[in-house]
Amino acid sequence: MKRFKKYILIFFSPILILALSSEILLRKIPNDYLYKKEYLDRNSKNISILFLGSSHAFFGINPEYIKSNSFNAAEVSQTLDLDLKILKKYDNKWDSLKYIVIPIDYFSLYSKLEKGIEAWRIKNYNLYYGMNISGNLAWYTEIFSNNIKVSFNKIYSYYIRGKSNISCSNSGWEFDYNNSKNKNDLNASGKNAAERHTAKDDQYFKENVNSLKLIIEFAREKKIKVLLFTFPAYKSYVQNLEKKQLNRTINTVTNLADSCQNTIYVNMLNDKSFNEEDYFDADHLNEIGAKKLTLKIDSIINNKPSQWR
């Protein structure tokens, strides 16, 4: 038995050392989550407008075109419960915050990152935001939360090739979806994205509505206004949306905004001022569309103060 244990230790020791070494290397690689957390640590008290939400906002809102001091804290697949956690993390530090802007899209009330196909992204909130979201031990590590090949490619890319893993601007906007790379078939990507975003059931609906209500209540207590809006999308995406899910989302957020004095809702889903040149794919804007949308949001905030009661 002792000899058997000895062989086990001999076999596993190099693997454990490799895993630990890789974990240390991976955590030292700068990334968007750590950048945003450290930015908020330093600057949350100075931000006037905070953008939250999923990849639609991450790629589609560029704070450089906002007149007031603003920051984009959105991320890929970031759901409403995580938006709420970010707000609460800096609970007593929003000294200058006047507006919270959150997209409520077709999938927003029906999805939860922790339960989706990209649940591995939870590790970014645990490791870099310092949150305690899940009991899944793998999501408290880099090396075990993702594909081994992906992890070693990250190590090679950063330490050998010197390639940065930060893909957002100083103000938090993801600039990778630009017009020069737009080779996506807008018709095909629209149908695929609509199918991907159509929920099988509504098991997270009540939870997401509650998260949204808590965000609005959090803002109300601090005298912060909330702008909810639905992102513009290319016609191939809109035409393939399931009507019941879409209508329930729009009706719910409309009624919620109508009942809350600090909140307004703007539906831009079918905004005809956006055309083919504005999209990277059927439901994400490129840098041209991001500028157009950000200027629209800035105009709403600055020119329609009476809508907030």
Image (tube, grey):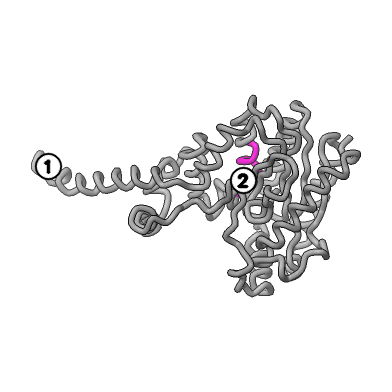
Most common SS among magenta residues: helix
Residue 129 position within the rendered picture, expressed as x and y whole percent measured from the top left: 52, 37
Residue 187 position within the rendered picture, expressed as x and y whole percent measured from the top left: 69, 74
Q: Secondary structure at mark 2?
A: loop
Quarter that holds the C terminus: top right
Q: Which mark is residue 171?
A: 2
Residues marked 1 and 2 touching at CB (< 8 Å): no
- Does the rendering let one see residue 55? yes
Residue 255 position within the rendered picture, expressed as x and y whole percent measured from the top left: 85, 43
Compare residues 156 and 4 and report the one nearer the observer. Answer: 156
Mark 2 closeness class: few <14, some 14–19, many ≥20 residues within 10 Å: some
Three-letter amino acid code at disc 2?
A: Ser
Residue 174 position within the rendered picture, expressed as x and y whole percent measured from the top left: 59, 54
Residue 197 lies in quadrant = bottom right
On the image, numbered disc 1 is attached to which residue?
6
Mark 1 or mark 2, which has the lower sequence index? 1
